[in-house]
Image (tube, rainbow, N blue to C red):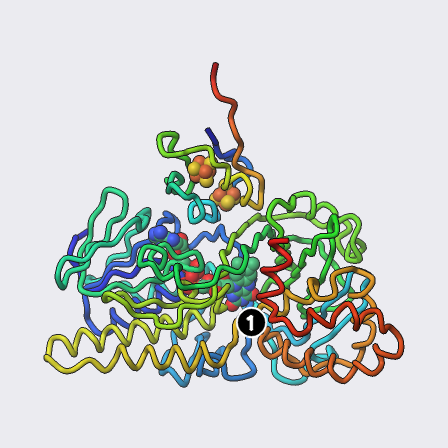
Amino acid sequence: MVRINTDECVSCGGCIDLCPTVAIRMVDDRVVIDPEKCTTCKICVQVCPLNAPRVLEEAG
Amino acid sequence: MKEQYDVIIVGAGPAGLLAAKALAENGFDIAVLDRRKDLTTLTRTCGQSLLPPNEYFFGDLFHYNAKDKRFCFPHSGLSFPYTGPVKNLYTWRMFSPGMQKMQFGRGQGNEGAPIALSYDKEVLIECMLNEIKSDHVDVINETEFTDIAFQGPTIVVQAGDKTFQSKLVIAADGTNSRVVEKLGYNNNRRHIANLYVKSCFVKGFTPPFEESIITGISFIDSKPVYVFLLPRPEGAEWNFLILTFEAGLDLEAAYEKIIAESGFAEWFKGCEKTREFAAIESIYSPVVKPFRNNVLITGDAGSCQELECLGAMVTGWKAGLTVAAALKEQQLGIAPQAIPQYEEWWLNTYIKKYDYQDYLSIFGIAYIFANPEVVDYVFGLMEEPFLPTFNPYRAVGLLGERLQSLIPTIMAERPDILQQLAGKMLMFPSDLLVQTLTE
Ligand SMILES: Cc1cc2nc3c(=O)[nH]c(=O)nc-3n(C[C@H](O)[C@H](O)[C@H](O)COP(=O)(O)OP(=O)(O)OC[C@H]3O[C@@H](n4cnc5c(N)ncnc54)[C@H](O)[C@@H]3O)c2cc1C
Ligand code: SF4
Ligand code: SF4
């Protein structure tokens, strides 16, 4: 799955608009990915101007 | 917070807030939804310069009334207080990679009308929010539009687990509008590219001239990157933007390179970043018919790239007045006039007047000339300043005329460039972008 590095994300909202499964939401002006909805398509990783979303290795 | 309103406005940007002002003044019950919590702290990049204040734009002649500190749109009958700082900008200098320069405006002192007004967008949003304070207006933050459904004459707006109902909806949720997407408009629009932006405010940027907008074309790993440097209205701060159409180009690395190695490096020495922003814009051809299923589209939600804040404000205000009149028509059982008039106005004042292809042409320059050496050569031919403007649509017209007149010179000096251009010059810049980016 993918997680947003909060140190680098400025909450511009761009990835929210482009995520195909609407897995990204703004909560308290922070951008979070719902792991249930994320398909690890990596679109947010490719489009973020600040390289904030990171692919996490699958556990196990 | 209620669940039932006359009108729901999605998006509390310049367009949504002025639509809200129009409806609030007419006494309708409205809700403005926005996914952000703190509406007056911006996180998405904006140049924060109002342009163009020296000509009609979207049918109005915006100006700042300094006596009373008001933003005025005389043609639309709109004015409201803006209490923040302003700075007039008179010249636009556009640099090639090798620092050859094109200039709009003469840059000699402050004579003539300014080409842009630098302002503080956070104060503007605060002032707009003040304008709509009323018992019958709910500004509902932390509420993200997710879906829309139609039950007879009622529109059901879904925002996560919250549900709202209204008679009409105004879509003002910006350039990647989800309302527009959900209504199916994007199926008939042409997707041209995505624009990726990193920006920050910097202190200590010291170019050898003041009150000038500075832009530049750079090539990073042979990919075009555009730089914008806009003076902030106070505090010797600059708004520094880096834009690219190239997916996957590392904007963080580009930022370091521009500061350390570009022609601007000297002016960046010792500068310090104060705040950081970003933006992604999906660039579609504009929505041509902005009303469907009792949803009216306004501001960037219906445009290609962006309408600029002035365009967003004028269209948002117009949309609010239109919906107020449409509701009144419904109450009185009068045949609909207001919405057809808005559609016609959108068509004549935006679609037919401001060709999105022209807007994109400014970004097309780097793709047309394709390499730094050629961009340097062409910029070098354009020493004579152009008329003062920062209106991209107008600037493109001026550039095109000048290029036309330079063809004999280029033919004599650099026939290779004309050969290289032959096909590209005939192509619309949006076609060229699509072709280059999909190659
Ligand atoms: C790089 C860049 C530079 C620019 N430079 C300038 C400039 O110098 N001068 C200028 O005038 N303009 C500039 N602009 C354009 C300007 O920012 C826009 O034209 C203007 O903000 C459009 O206003 P709007 O109200 O239509 O949309 P926006 O300002 O984008 O407002 C949309 C609102 O909707 C909210 N929203 C989005 N999706 C949802 C959802 N699903 N649910 C709820 N809320 C949602 C957002 O949080 C936002 O508050 C620039 C833009 C960019 C990207
Ligand atoms: S695009 Fe990047 S900076 Fe913008 S909200 Fe998403 S993760 Fe954050
Ligand atoms: S990886 Fe794909 S599905 Fe997951 S959050 Fe990013 S864009 Fe959405």
B159 over A8 or under it: above or below: below
Residue at 67% across / 81% down in the picture? B398
Query: In the shown orientation, is residue B436 left or right of residue A43?
Result: right
Residue at 51% across / 26% down in the picture? A56
Estimate the x, y position of residue A5 in percent, counting from the top left: 52, 33
Q: What element carries label 1?
A: helix
Can the viewer see residue B229? yes
Estimate the x, y position of residue B387 in percent, counting from the top left: 68, 83
Q: Which amino acid does label 1 sit on?
A: Gln
The image quadrant where one finds ligand 1 is bottom left
Query: Given the image, what chain letter belongs to the residue carrying mark 1?
Result: B
Foreground residue among B291 and B410: B410
Estimate the x, y position of residue B159 in percent, counting from the top left: 27, 48
Query: In the shown orientation, is residue B428 left or right of residue A57?
Result: right
Can the viewer see residue A10? no
B72 over B154 or under it: above or below: below
Give the quarter of the image for residue B165: bottom left
What residue did someone put label 1 on? B357
Foreground residue among B204 and B97: B97
A6 over B63 or under it: above or below: above
Residue at 24% across / 49% down in the picture? B158
Residue at 65% across / 85% down in the picture? B112
Give the quarter of the image for residue B324: bottom left
